[in-house]
Structure formats: C-alpha cells, structure tokens
Image (tube, rainbow, N blue to C red):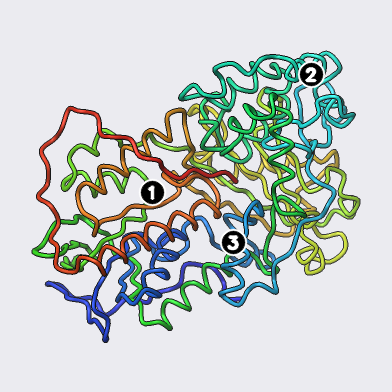
Amino acid sequence: MARGTGSEDPQAEPHGGTESPERTGRSRTAVVVGGGIAGLVAARTLLQRGLHVTVLERSGRFGGTVDGRLLGGLQLDSGAESFSTRSATVPALADELGLGGRIVSPDASGAWVQLPGKDLRASAQPLPTSGVLGIPADPSDPATTAVIGRAGALRASLDRVLPVGPLATRSQVSLGELVRIRMGDEVLNRLVAPVAGGVFSADPDDLDVDSVAPGLRVTMARLGSLGAAAGALRKAAPAGAAVGGLVGGMAQLRDALVQELRAGGADLRTGEQVRAISSSGTGWTVTTEHSTLTRHIRADGVLIATEGRAAVDLLAPVIPAIATERPDPVPGVALVTLIVDVPELDARPRGTGVLVARGVQGVAAKALTHATAKWAWLRDQAGPGSHVLRLSFGRVGDTAADVGLATPDDVLYRHALADASTLLAVPIHDADVLDWDVVRWAGALPHASVGHRERVGRIRALVAGRSASLAVTGGWLAGTGLVSVIDDARVRASALADALADAPTQAPAPAPAPASAEAPAADGPAGQV
C-alpha cells in the first residue's frame, strides 16, 4: 500500500488566469471543493455520470481524516481506523474499488470502560454490547449490572413501565435527556457518556438523538421502551461485529479513490485554496490561489465538500442568509500512537481498548485503542510482544488547561505513557517504547448538536433555492462516520448530475437579499458511527 503521507501532487502546472476545464467528450463540467472522503466520493459519482470533474484540495494531500503513515516499520492509520457495519455502504465501496477481499472484523473480545473510583483497576469493566451507543437492551443483564450497579439497574428497569409520553415526538431532544429520563443517571454517566465521548468527542446532552441514533425514538414509541428500541436497532444491524476494517489500514480506501479518479480523467489538485465562488453566465466561476497565483475556473456545477465553517464562508456571498447557519467550532483531537515491546500485553488485559468516563482522576486520555489486540492482521505484522496503542485526547467542553490539541508533543507523550499504564493495568516505561508519534486533527470532529436536523434542513433549502447546479456535502451535515459521509456525498453528487443533465443552460438565480423569514425546513440526512 502506498504510504498515506500526503505526498500526492496531481495538479497541473501552476498558472494564472481563467480556466475552462477540457471536456474530453463530456458535455458538462463540475468543480468539487474539498478533497476529503466526501469530496472524493462525490467526484467519483460525478465522473461516473459523465461529467468532467476538477477536485480542489487546500492541503497537500487527499482523504481528510482518512490517512496513514509508516511508524516503527508498521503501516498504520493516522485517522479513522474502522467503519460502521450497520449498512453495506463501506463494504460495497471497498468491493467496487478492489478492496473487498481485505475487509476484516475486529477481535471479538470487545472494549472496556474505565469508570471513576479510588481503585481504577477495580473500576474498569467490560463494555456491554447488547444495545446502541451504550444504551443497554436489558439493564438486568449481568454485564450491564456490573457497570451501573444494582441500584442503577433497578432505576433503568423502570424504562419498561414508564409511559413514553412526548419524548417520542417532541422536537430537539438530546441523547442525554432521553437516557436520563428513561434509564437514569447511572446508565447515562457510566455507559452512554463514555461511548459518546469516544465516538463523537461530545457530551450526550449536546447530541441530537435523532441524528446520532436515527430511528431510536420512533422504535421506542412503537415498542414502548428505550431498552427494547436499542435492542431492536442492534438486531437490525448486519450480523457480525459493529465495525470493520481493512487489512493494511483504512488509508487504502483514500488511495484507491484517488487512483480511480486519476485513471478516469479527473483533474485532482492539492495546495489549491478556494477563495470564492460566483455565478458566471450559465454556470459558476471558482476563484483559487495556488502559491502566489490566482486562478479562475469556470464550471457548470459546483459541489462544496469542505468542513462546515469553510463551506458557509464560501456560500455566504452567493446565499447571504446561510451566514447565520455557520456552525460553532468543533473540538480538535490529538492522537498519540505508541509502539511498545511489552509481552504482558499479549494477554489483551482490556480487550480491544478502553473508553474513559469523565471524572476519572489521573487519566487525561478520552480513549485508548489496543490496535494489535483489535486487529489480527496488525498483530501478525507486529509479532509477539510488540503492541500498537492509540490514545486520543480532546473533547467538547475541554478548557485551555486540559490535555488536548494544543499540548506539546513531549507532554502528550508523557501523558500517553502514564495513561496507557493505568488503563491497561500493565506498567509501560520509556525503555519499552520502540517508536511513537503525535497526529493532530483540528476541527475534524463535527457532531450533531441539538437542533442539528432542523439546521440541516434550513441549509439544504437555502442551497436548493439558490441553484440546482450548486450542492454541499460533508460530515458537518451528514453526520459522523464514513457511512453517513459516503451516503450523503453520493446523494448530493447524483442530484447535481441530474440537474446539469436536465437543465444544461439554466443560469443560477440572482443572489437573494438577506431574509429575516425562517427558511422552510427540509428533511436532512443524519448518521451515526
């Protein structure tokens, strides 16, 4: 596999002036702004629909949070290292790209949760897997009771008899409110909060339940309890593990997409900062900067696939009303990877890793993944006694004093070494470390806060009202996780291709004046990991 070091440099020779992309026999042209997975998948869809496609990526590489690097002689993911198997989206894409034979499931031992307590070793427990997002299908199950205690299990059991009431139909309900009312604080704090922190880097009270767990409230209304709904959603997922991965790492997905796009004639450019988009006759002009050169690229359609704040900043000059929908900053995460020689870890003392509840004293990490315990292919490559540990730092609500994105590398390393020793209950020393590094993801974890679906609906309506030749996608709208990102990118790109095919000469509508009236809501996609 090619190393995911961001070394791709597929752009044309730098030049200024105005470009009209060569159509190479195709009737329409489209520019995709943003070369993360959303942008690459959208570009692939547009290319398959017969458009000439130009992809503009600000950074020096493609893939967004899907990336990899060589560390300690091992090819490792430096961002996303798995995908949800709740749908066939990612396996199908992998198969189309020739990677289907590399799909694997993680070790069946599962993860643990580290709870607060004077004796941290005693307060670590295996994480129950019967429900969704930490919500137990059966609070009386021994594995669940071991985490929430008997009193917590008794409180949670009231969920079976409490009337569902308006929780099933009221707008803007958070995951935290739903769990607290139905099952109580112990389930919320000791199960759901650690999972939400690990998956979304967010507090459950700030997460829109319909966005992070689609169908949960509807199923609760039908079955009469939250536990039954969580169990039903779990059973409805495809058989096998809740997540999957690729032998050799998830960065291969990015590499295969880039390779296919290049082979299909797409114009892929890195180091290209998009400064503005504007209507231009029957299409659009995209103004970019590369080094010190300014370019103007003409296209029939534009699809914005950047992170949320950048997307709104680009769209606001042509859709003034969208400026009020600019999302708040999202948390940054620092990922510390340790490669250690500690034979005691061969026993996988904490399964595939540990999620850390808030309030655990002496631990700064929010989660630890024991990668060589989780993935057999990586374990085989590392060999007996050698282990890969991934510790992540940073979540919503952290202050400048908390360990996270702004913490210097050497300080993060010390925290990671101490936290790994505590969470795995095995001493790990400097002398045991074969290699280590820090990867930082600034603003890379959008999460669906309360009211997210309504915001998405307003944004979709504003963009659709401006022009059918303009589209926007990305995790900040679609939701966290590759499934949601890929599905939404395909939908938006397909709609754009349809619009360009059906109305090839239609010019974008004039930019509207800022409106005070609330835009009509439209259903927006939502997803979960």
Local packing at callout 3 (Cα closer than 10 Å; few below 14, some 14-19, many 20+) is many
Mark 1, residue position: 307
Q: CA distance from mark 2 to mark 1?
A: 41 Å
Secondary structure category for the residue under label 3: helix
Q: Which is more toward the observer, 467 or 303?
A: 467
Local packing at callout 2 (Cα closer than 10 Å; few below 14, some 14-19, many 20+) is some
Whether residue 266 is situated above or below residue 124 in the rendered picture? below
Q: Residue at 86% across / 51% down in the picture? A: 345
Q: Residue at 19% across / 28% down in the picture? A: 517
Mark 2, residue position: 157
Whether residue 486 is situated above or below residue 221 in the rendered picture? below
Mark 3, residue position: 90
**309 horizontally vs 5: left or right:** left
Give the mark nearest the N terminus, 3 or 2.
3
Whether residue 234 is situated above or below residue 22 in the rendered picture? above
Give yes or no for contact between labels 1 and 3 (Cβ–Cβ under 8 Å).
no
**409 horizontally vs 35: left or right:** right
Secondary structure category for the residue under label 1: loop
Looking at the rendered image, the disc whose residue lies closer to the viewer, 2 or 1, is 2
Q: Residue at 38% across / 68% down in the picture? A: 43
Q: Residue at 44% across / 44% down in the picture? A: 443
Mark 1 residue type:
Glu
Q: CA distance from mark 3 to mark 2?
A: 36 Å
